[in-house]
Image: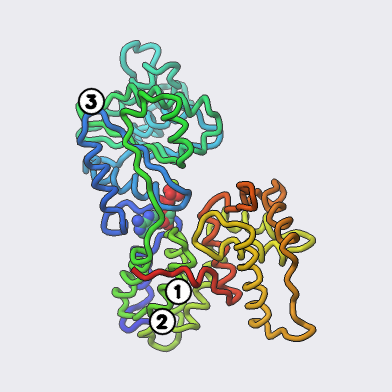
Amino acid sequence: MFQGIDNDKIKEILRQHFTPSDHITTPERLLGRDRLLERIDRAFNSSGRLVFIYGDRGVGKSSLALTAAHLHNSAQSQPIHVNCSEHGTFESVLTAIGRAAVDVVERFESPGAAPSFNLTVMGNGVGYSPGNNGAARVNAPSDINEAVDIIRYVGSKRSGTVVIVIDEFERIKSVSERMKFAELIKNFPDDGGRIHLIICGIASTVDELLGAHPSAGRRLETVEVQRLHHDQLWKIITNAADKVNVEVGRETLIRIGMISDGFPHYVHLIGESLFWAMHDDEKVVSKCKARHYKAGIAEAIGRSDAIYKAAYNTATKKTKNTADYENALWALADHNDLQRQLGDIYKSYLHIVAQLNRLEGLGGEDRKEPIARTALNSRLQRLRDPNHGEIIIGHGAGWFSFRENVIRGYVRLVAEEKGLELARDNFIPK
Ligand SMILES: Nc1ncnc2c1ncn2[C@@H]1O[C@H](COP(=O)(O)OP(=O)(O)O)[C@@H](O)[C@H]1O
Ligand SMILES: [Mg+2]
């Protein structure tokens, strides 16, 4: 437990500081993104300019977008946040934006029935009527003019500045649907700088839009979100530590920073678990100890994002060679370089097997013998297959990387629990 902090108080503090499963929406909690917020601010100030935020999954795109959106959106309402989905289309996203402008109570409790947008009947401009047929009916825009009308309609329903965030753009599978957004970008009605649009996606989706429609590109401010630096990752922990008057040592901060690999999700997750472990300690805790750290790591694995866990299990849990697959993933994750070559991965692998033997006290005949380099290569090749979830990508000539960089954090977390310190030599203090 912490001196003078009861159960309710600790809950409140942890809820405020750790959000492993939620976006950040306030600048005080958004660490290390001041320059990017400023760039977005300036882009919004420039007539007709829209923002495309791109970067790896889990790096903090939505948090940046929503914080910027909250900063700029008129205080009387919330920004509009629409998530794309696999089967999403241009029409469905625009319809969702239109609906978001109608208050949810109004949508469900209008007398008689759900409301609908009536684009075709109104001709010029989007009409909105409470409806009376008992079913939600939102007409999808049939062309770009109707899509533009929806944006104008949203602007007319709100007073002051409106920020619309189209999130997870890369999830829309159909290229032709994604391409339709280029038209919207070109024709976006910003109503004299009152309506702003932010799209979030991965790098390839922005390249695709720009490649196919250079004229849309001229209106887009592209903002790349990079992984967070160590000092910002540490601040996530130390900000909370200051609130409960506990000291978290430098070594612990370095380890957490290394595991998370610049992806804040893992720091929030480990941090939250770590503070609960200290709170659960019967003695008063003034300094984070190894036992708290261990408990925090174990707990964090269980609570990791299900997507990352599933990817790891699909890749490694096989009837044969499970240990080899795990060791191969650990070896690939043993360095900060995103792409690594077989020779280097094999060196990491040998080091890992030696560490495992030491950790498990195996010597002499009991020692686990490493597999040969060619065998490791074939395990890595296998990990690119669909039945291993394609967790790895091969780049030719013995070069490999994880398909999604964010997975490396989970791989490092699992290794850490086994007592393996991956990427230990990579830490470069600022
Ligand atoms: N700048 C930041 N400082 C601290 N935590 C952050 C920051 N950006 C994101 N996070 C946290 O990291 C996790 C992932 O962020 P998110 O915005 O959902 O990433 P993305 O949209 O790129 O997948 C969330 O738990 C969020 O609370
Ligand atoms: Mg996101």
**2 or 3: tag closer to the N-terminus:** 3
User: In whole angstroms, how far apart are the C-alphas of marks 1 and 3?
Assistant: 48 Å
- Which of the 4 image quarters holds residue 414? bottom right
Q: Is residue 22 visible?
A: no
Which quadrant holds the C terminus? Answer: bottom left
Residue under numbered circle 1: 274
Q: Specify whether 252 is left or right of 321.
A: left
Which quadrant holds the N terminus? Answer: bottom left
Q: Secondary structure at mark 2?
A: loop
User: In whole angstroms, how far apart are the C-alphas of marks 2 and 1?
Assistant: 8 Å
Mark 1, Cα crowd under 10 Å, few <14 / some 14-19 / many 20+, is many
The amino acid beneath tag 2 is Cys
Q: Specify whether 121 is left or right of 176.
A: left
- Number of the label disc, if any, that sits on residue 191: 3
The answer to whether the residue labelled 2 contacts the one labelled 1, judged by CB atoms less than 8 Å apart, is yes
- Number of the label disc, if any, that sits on residue 288: 2
**2 or 1: tag closer to the N-terminus:** 1
